[in-house]
């Protein structure tokens, strides 16, 4: 299934993969990322248990056919350096235990999403500010193939078979807009990047603020979008003839009005839990970059998201970026 997703992403972005004459940092970038609570040390299957994402950052010398869908956005800076991204993702959520056929009262429901994403980034020419607008469109429920994906992985690993997927959230379209503004303040060997953002849609509605600290070589002249290579959002891949290691850490807080994966389906009565209005993440990670490759890892600590949740969540993620 994931091979098909990757090929579809390349087909969507192929028209922009062109110019061999472009500077290395302006060339298209293909990204593949995976997040899983298995990487969160505890090794449990619960809450946000898995995410897979493929993305194609179009080269700056050309733009995808869909650019007009977001170019009008009023929050994008005018006269800025523009870049575009096309992606596909799958997210999987489970309750605190996957052993039973029924979810215990007060626990979050089984849920999954399969969606396409498009994003546009406008970065000021001095690199000190960037604005990103994203649109996610997909499906919640059985059509997300979350059940099949998790059961396949567990069969390969010879792990516990998840038994409660017949209770998952029902089919529903997913439509969400996202916006993030990031600033960059860099010095030799260090960069600090505060950000604010918001999401609006039937999946996520929240406001957010946070900051990222990066330490290592090659940071003084980087644009804001390059400080978090493992996060969604148009991270370029600068040329690097020698291996470059960066360490990253950060925090983000969110004021949450809606999280469909917790609250349940929008238009039908069904399973759901009471969402906590304030949620926070802390993360630490590292990024190793050499020539046209970058491998990144992060570990995330997430505060309780719903009333009755059993402790905080920890998960990890890997991202591989390839300049093409």
Image: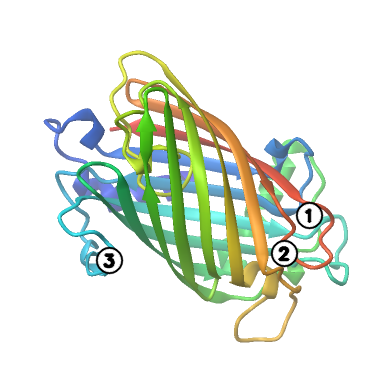
Closer to the eye: label 3 or 2: 3
Looking at the rendered structure, the secondary structure element under dot 3 is helix
Q: Quadrant of residue 48?
A: bottom right
- Relative placement, left or right, of 225 versus 207 is left
- Image coordinates of residue 190 in percent, x first then y, are 43, 28
Q: Residues within 10 Å of mark 3 (few under 14, many from 20)?
A: some
Cα distance between the residues tagged 2 and 1:
10 Å
Distance of label 3 from label 1 (alpha carbons): 39 Å
Q: Position of residue 45 (x, y in %)?
A: 76, 48
How far apart are the two marked residues, 3 and 2, measured between alpha carbons? 32 Å
* Tag 2 residue: 110
Q: Position of residue 126 (x, y in %)?
A: 22, 41
Mark closer to the observer (3, 1): 3
Q: Secondary structure at mark 2?
A: loop
- Identify whether 165 is placed above or below 29: below
Secondary structure under tag 1 reads loop
Residue occupying image coordinates x 82% and y 46%? 160
Q: Which quadrant would the C terminus be assigned to in this image? A: top left
Residue 191: % across, % down = 42, 33
Residue located beneath label 1 in the image: 162
Q: Residue furthest bottom?
A: 268
Residue positioned 54% across, 55% down in the render: 90
* The label number, if any, that marks residue 70 in the structure image: 3
CB under 8 Å between discs 2 and 1: yes
Task: Please identify the quarter of the rendering in which residue 65 is found.
Answer: bottom left
List the single residue furthest toward the left.
Answer: 21
At 35% from the left and 13% from the top, the residue drawn is 242
Which mark lies nearer to you, 2 or 1? 2
Residue 19 as seen in the image, left or right of residue 267: left
Q: Is residue 267 left or right of residue 179?
A: right
């Amino acid at each position: 299934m994931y091979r098909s997703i990757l090929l579809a992403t390349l087909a969507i972005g192929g028209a922009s993969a062109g110019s061999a004459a472009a500077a290395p940092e302006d060339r298209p970038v293909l990204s593949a990322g995976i997040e899983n609570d298995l990487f969160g040390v505890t090794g449990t299957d619960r809450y946000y248990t898995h995410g897979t994402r493929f993305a194609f950052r179009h080269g700056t010398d050309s733009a995808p056919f869909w650019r007009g869908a977001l170019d009008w956005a009023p929050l994008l800076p005018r006269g800025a350096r523009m870049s575009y991204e096309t992606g596909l993702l799958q997210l999987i959520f489970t309750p605190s235990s996957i052993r039973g056929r029924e979810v215990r009262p007060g626990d979050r429901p089984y849920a999954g999403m399969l969606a396409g994403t498009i994003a546009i980034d406008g970065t000021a020419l001095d690199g000190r500010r960037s604005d990103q607008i994203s649109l996610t469109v997909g499906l919640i429920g059985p059509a997300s193939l979350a059940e099949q994906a998790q059961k396949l992985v567990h069969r390969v690993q010879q792990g516990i078979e998840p038994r409660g997927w017949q209770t998952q959230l029902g089919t529903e379209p997913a439509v969400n807009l996202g916006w993030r503004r990031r600033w960059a303040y860099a010095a030799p060997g260090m960069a600090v990047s505060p950000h604010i953002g918001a999401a609006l849609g039937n999946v996520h509605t929240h406001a957010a603020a946070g900051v990222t600290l990066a330490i290592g070589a090659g940071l003084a002249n980087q644009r804001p979008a390059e400080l978090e290579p493992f996060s969604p959002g148009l991270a370029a891949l600068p040329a690097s003839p020698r291996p470059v290691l960066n360490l990253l850490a950060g925090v983000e807080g969110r004021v949450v009005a809606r999280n469909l994966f917790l609250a349940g389906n929008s238009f039908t009565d069904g399973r759901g839990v009471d969402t906590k209005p304030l949620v926070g993440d802390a993360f630490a990670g590292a990024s190793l970059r050499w020539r046209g490759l970058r491998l990144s890892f992060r570990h995330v600590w997430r505060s309780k998201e719903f009333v009755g949740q059993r402790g905080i969540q920890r998960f990890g993620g890997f991202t591989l970026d390839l300049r093409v």
